[in-house]
Image: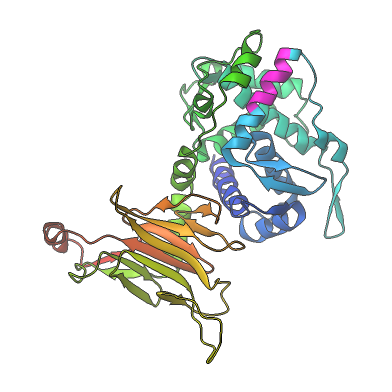
């Protein structure tokens, strides 16, 4: 049981690393070696997880070893692809079958064909869940999929495969086990209702109206994607911040400050309605100058004007926008690029720019401070 739970946590950490490549080409070999050092030493298992994420649609394979991060849009595409296959009664013939040669990592060969089948297995699971009005799937249905795709091997029994699937999918906040007995075990979808974006209540693979639904009612609006990933990765961000030993005394802000940015060796009170974070211009007599309110250290992959925090007067909240075209920022562990809309900053939001992690705080009411001072002298950023 401990090993299965650990695998789910490792899968979540690997997905976090993959999500950091939003808007970039992902080199499968390099990300596997990175995850070997940070997540799991077993390269064969990492390859399997890589193709599981491909099957779920979080990443999309574009060549033998290259992927792009596709998030919930990719998951929706996988579900619709699975339904289309069921509708036309065809076999999976995605282009990536053309790239099924062995991976060669550090001069050692690793077969990826079984991993590709695992990706198809996870794709079939989410397809069947969304084809079911109750958004549920029974264990015996999953067992049939294992048998159909011939996933079992000497070291991987059907029970082990299903238990690992449950660990991964529950750790990713996608499934929840609802029945304790194996014979009647069912799994309920608790992840984002992504097909609601298409105004489709139920997918029926054999309905002649399905294609009309997909072509006439497709309206993509994935505002909830950032919420899903923020909640999913929150504990990973908390551990990262704890490692930086960021501490904040429980005192109120100066009356002139609207908010506070706090990081290791950084305390910055926001005293105006818009501030620019970036790299200081330290070149004397340079004809190129730029404005920066909060200057972060040089040599840390910081752009001249990397991000702007501003107060939205209409909606009455602070928000942050990435200004750098090459280097994204991360808000509550969600990747934000210069092409994305501004993101709302909440009390205790985590902001990562380059290697700097800053926590965003709004001032506490005096009554709140008095209530907490009796039990908490110092507040550690969680």
Quarter of the image where the N terminus is located: top right
Q: In this view, does 336 lie above or below 139?
A: below
Q: Give the x, y percent position of residue 54.
A: 69, 39
Q: Is residue 243 left or right of residue 208?
A: left
Tell me where residue 269 sits by quadrant.
Answer: bottom left
Image point (56%, 88%), residue name: 286
Q: In front here: 264 or 83?
A: 83
Residue 358 position, x and y percent, is 41, 66
Q: Quadrant of residue 111?
A: top right
> In front: 180, or 80?
80
Q: Does the magenta stretch include residue 83?
A: yes
Camera-side residue: 194 or 232? 194
Across and down, in percent, residue 178 comes to 46, 23
Q: Indicate the colouring scheme.
A: rainbow
Residue at coordinates 70% horizontally, 55% vertically from top-left? 31
Horizontally, residue 235 falls left or right of residue 274, namely right
Q: Is the magenta stretch mostly helix, strand or loop?
A: helix
Residue 372 location (% of width, % of height): 17, 59
Q: Give the residue furthest to the front.
A: 287
Residue pictured at 56% horizontal, 59% vertical: 328
Furthest residue to the bottom? 284
184 with respect to 326 (left or right) = left
Q: Can residue 90 be seen in this view?
A: yes
Relative vertical location of residue 381 with respect to residue 169 in this rendering, above or below: below
Q: What stretch is highlighted in magenta?
A: 79-87
């Amino acid at each position: 049981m401990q090993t299965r739970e650990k695998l789910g946590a490792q899968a979540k950490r690997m997905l976090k690393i993959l999500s950091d490549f939003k808007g970039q080409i992902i080199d499968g070999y390099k990300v596997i070696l990175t995850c070997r050092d940070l997540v799991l030493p077993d390269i064969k298992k990492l390859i399997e997880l890589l193709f599981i994420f491909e099957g779920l649609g979080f990443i999309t394979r574009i060549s033998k070893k290259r992927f792009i991060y596709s998030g919930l849009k990719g998951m929706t595409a996988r579900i619709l692809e699975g339904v289309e296959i069921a509708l036309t009664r065809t076999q999976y013939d995605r282009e990536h079958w053309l790239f099924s040669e062995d991976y060669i990592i550090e001069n050692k060969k690793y077969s990826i064909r079984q991993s590709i089948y695992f990706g198809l297995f996870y794709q079939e699971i989410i397809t069947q869940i969304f084809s079911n009005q109750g958004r549920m799937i029974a264990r015996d249905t999953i067992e049939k999929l294992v048998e159909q795709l011939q996933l079992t091997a000497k070291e991987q029994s059907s029970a082990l495969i299903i238990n690992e699937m449950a660990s991964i999918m529950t750790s990713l906040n996608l499934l929840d086990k609802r029945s304790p007995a194996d014979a009647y075990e069912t799994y309920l979808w608790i992840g984002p209702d992504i097909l609601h974006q298409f105004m489709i209540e139920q997918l029926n693979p054999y309905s002649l109206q399905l294609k009309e639904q997909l072509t006439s009612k497709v309206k993509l609006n994935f505002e909830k994607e950032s919420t899903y990933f923020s909640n999913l990765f929150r504990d990973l961000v908390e551990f990262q911040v704890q490692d930086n030993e960021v501490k904040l005394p429980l005192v109120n802000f100066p009356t002139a400050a609207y908010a506070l940015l706090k990081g290791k060796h950084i305390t910055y009170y926001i005293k105006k309605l818009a501030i620019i974070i970036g790299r200081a211009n330290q070149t004397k007599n340079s004809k190129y100058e730029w404005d920066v309110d909060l200057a972060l250290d040089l040599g840390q992959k910081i752009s001249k004007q990397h991000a702007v925090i501003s107060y939205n007067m209409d909606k009455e909240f602070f928000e942050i926008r990435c200004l750098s075209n090459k280097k994204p920022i991360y808000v509550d562990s969600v990747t934000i690029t210069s092409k994305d809309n501004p993101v709302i900053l909440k009390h205790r939001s985590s902001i990562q720019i380059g290697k700097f992690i800053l926590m965003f705080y709004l001032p506490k009411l005096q009554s709140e401070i008095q209530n907490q001072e009796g039990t908490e002298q110092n507040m550690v950023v969680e």
